[in-house]
Image (spheres, rainbow, N blue to C red):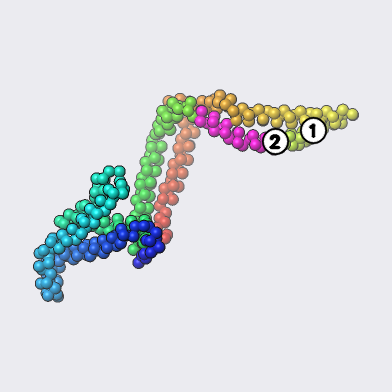
Amino acid sequence: MFTINRENLRNSHQVFWFIVDFVMLGLLFINICWIILDSLYAIDAVNELLASYMPTIVELYRPIHKNFIFYDLIFVSIFLSEFVIRWLYAIRTKLYGRWYFYPFIHWYDVLGCIPIGSYRFLRVLRVISIVYRLHKYKVIDFTKTRLYTFLKFYYEAFMEELSDRIVIKVLSGAQEELSHGSPMVHRIQNDILLPRKDLLTSWLSQRVAEAAEHGYVPNRGALRHYLENCVDQALNNNAELSRLRLIPVLGSQITETLEEAVGDIVAQVIHQIMDDLASARNHGFIEDIVDTFLKADDGLSEDTSGQEQQIIKVVNEIIDVMKDQMQIKRWRQDL
């Protein structure tokens, strides 16, 4: 069973209303149990069975059963009084935007007070709302109860079965669309991406500039040093340059000057490229790339149809793997 956290109850500054909640829970429990017992008593087969084994109780309860609505109205009057008090409190504290919102938000309280037919069983919703409110303020914790564990397990099992079937159905539909040559990809490219090419270009240009600025500029010195070392190593391994070192007097000076020049040229070229990418000058370059990837396409050409069929086959195989994974039921493993 759940326990009452007295410390949270005191710190909530709503002790009075929580006491009212506990009193209403007790009354609702008694009232709902009484409704269930009276409904069973009204069944002829149950009435005859009770008359056979407990005739005295049947005779004593018969006048109560005839006037059950009167006794139920006593509970209803208590429930309505509590409802009106809470409504007035909500108006006083401006709990909701309008004074008349309260009965609409707590519609189950209103309908549950109707003392006829199946409306009485809506009082179960009131029990749930009170328990939820107490749990929300951490006055009680029913997540550790066996009933909650039991209901949670089978709820999650039901939701997993339902969601898996829906996902498998959606994936199967996607496979069927792909197999029949769905124009979805071309519609996305021609109807969605192409009209927004300028927006995509601007966004990519900005992102590339930010990446170059934050990634390259702070590490410019380290990158230059790395490039110079790479150039030096490449030139040292070059056979033609090694022959230049054999020239008397000037050989070493020529090779050193050449290594410095090549290293400086490579570093300057990389530096200029990254500077261009980190500035607004990269817009034209990004626009060319976007134009290359986003070209108006009316359909599959003869050259690309075979490749796209292979891509569709790969996508279908990926979806099959996803569907197989959906067949694994975690709730069965937990069980």
Magenta-span inclusion, residue 214? yes
Query: Residue 191: x percent and y percent?
Result: 41, 28
Residue extending farthest to the right is: 248
Kindly identify the residue that appears in the image at 63 percent across and 35 percent down.
Answer: 216
Query: Would residue 259 appear left or right of 303 to someone viewing this image?
Result: right
Q: Disc number at residue 239?
A: 1
Under tag 2, what secondary structure? helix
Cβ–Cβ under 8 Å for marks 2 and 1: no
Q: Inspect this view and state whether residue 284 appears.
A: yes
Q: Nearer the viewer, residue 321 or 296?
A: 296
Q: Would you say the magenta stretch is mainly helix, strand or loop?
A: helix
Query: Residue 116: x percent and y percent?
Result: 15, 56
Q: Tell me the magenta residue range.
A: 201-222
Q: Please identify the quarter of the rendering in which residue 256 is found.
A: top right
Which callout, 2 or 1, points to the residue nearer the camera? 2
Kindly identify the residue that appears in the image at 51 percent across and 28 percent down.
Answer: 202
